[in-house]
Amino acid sequence: MFRRVLIANRGEIALRILRSLRALGIEGVVVHGREDRLTLPVRMADEGAFIPRDDPLASYLDIEAVVAAAKEVGADAVHPGYGFLAENATLAERLAEEGIVFIGPSPGVLRLLGDKISARHAMVKAGLPVAKGSGQPISDETEALSMAKEIGYPVMIKAAAGGGGIGMQVVNSGDEFESALRLCQGRALSAFGDDRVFVEKFIEGAQHIEFQVLGDGNKAVHFGERFCSIQRRHQKIIEEGPWLSEEVRAELGAKVVAGAEAVGYKGLATFEFLRDSNGEFYFLEVNPRVQVEHTVTEMIAGVDLVSLGIKVAAGEPLPISQSDIQISGHAIQTRINAEDPFTLKPSPGRIWECHWPGGPGVRVDTHSHTGYDMPPSFDSLLAKLIVWAPNRDEALAKMDAALAETIIIGVDTLIPLHRAIMSEPDFRNGNITIAYLDEHPGILDGV
Ligand code: MV4
């Protein structure tokens, strides 16, 4: 097992990783820039690794500085968390050159999955269902147009280097195709330096469902699904689980395990799917890292996913077998972002008073505290509130009570929005698609 791990991240996930390191008896060192030097993860770490930069984000994005810090503090592994360098194949490669473990998949797997065309191809080969589409980058405009016609409108044009929805275009008819293609290619080129795009049938009225997977580079297991109920601008704000019947979970679970094993996946992964109104599933992409919402799965499966990810990175074979994994009850997470709940604009500043809820089945993952100064430079995630109960109705009631117990003075948060959603009939009935917030624009006004 590792003796010392460098956490190349900040905020709640840096603290979350530190907790798993403690549970495993491993020392934790936390990377930080100037603004974060007094934050909880840095204060609670065995040591801080200061990477001073004028741009606050740069401290967490400088590959060579992270490699140098890992060497300097004597870390035998680096945990990248999510965001920042978490999916960066070059970091994984540079660490390998220095004899330091990257806690995540190999550089080759990161490259394969980072390219949505090659990821799609690998998963089709492993037997996963995908939306009708080319599966090839578009090279010729007239050819692409005839393919779109064959797939049938509406279609979606997506960037190969994409993910997170950047550049994505929905096309409803042939005469919109050319301009949408140019727009998508232009956006892809400026965002990723790679203008390759591909076409897929647009799945309408879909739900977003994702499977939690753990691989050891050889074998893999799944921990069931999460339903990403509510998102806006490709940022989820509410996640819950389970969502599927045991039969469907077992069937799709076997497929994601086959997909992970086919690429020799090592570490935690999330397989993202759309499910249309007929219950058909379409593979979207693999997120090769721990996710913000891993907590939902931890609550319903009774596991410490971050610890499991660290164990397989250290070379242990899968520490858990599929038959040991049992899903029980229902968990739901609301993201408490420091934002105006109406406009969803960030609301940074000093937290004058901060009180988090508690009680049975209530979990709060946060780096915030009374006196914490929420910086404007980073993601606005202040805390994750997760509750567990025997069933969904009780979980929603418990979530509403926990939100009502929470006191945050000094910054605006999404709490009023979450409370409105908890009592909205479509949400309560599970009548939820990825367009939920667009379809309920007046939710905070009680419309
Ligand atoms: C789609 C889709 C509909 N049809 N693909 C968004 C981000 C990227 N991961 C893929 N995305 C989508 N791909 C087809 N063929 C709709 C989306 C999409 C979406 C997916 C999951 C969660 C939220 C979303 C919001 C808008 C669009």
Image (cartoon, rainbow, N blue to C red):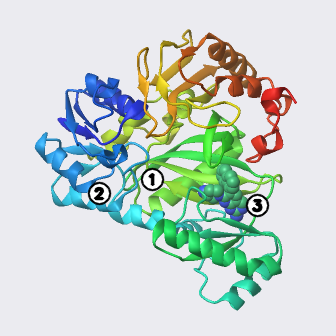
Ligand 1: does it lie within 8 Å of the C-beta at label 3? Answer: yes
Which numbered marker is on residue 288? 1
Is 386 rendered above or below residue 108? above
Q: Quadrant location of the N terminus?
A: top left
**Relative depth, front residue between 257 and 18:** 18
Indicate the secondary structure of the residue bearing disc 1. loop
Residue at 75 percent across and 21 percent down: it is: 393
Whether residue 352 appears in this view of the structure is: yes
Indicate the secondary structure of the residue bearing disc 2. helix
Mark 2 lies on residue = 92
Whether residue 282 appears in this view of the structure is: no
Image quadrant assignment for residue 187: bottom right
Residue at 61 percent across and 29 percent down: it is: 334
Is 146 rendered above or below residue 365? below
Is 201 rendered above or below residue 360? below
Horizontal placement of 26 versus 300: left or right? left
**Relative depth, front residue between 374 and 278:** 374
Using a 10 Å C-alpha cutoff, classify the residue at mark 2 as few (fewer than 14 neighbours), some (14 to 19) or many (20 or more). many
Residue 20, percent from left and from top: 34, 29
As measured in the structure, the alpha-carbon distance from the residue carrying label 3 to the one carrying label 1 is: 24 Å
Mark 3 lies on residue = 203
Sequence order check, earlier mark of 3 and 1: 3
Using a 10 Å C-alpha cutoff, classify the residue at mark 1 as few (fewer than 14 neighbours), some (14 to 19) or many (20 or more). many
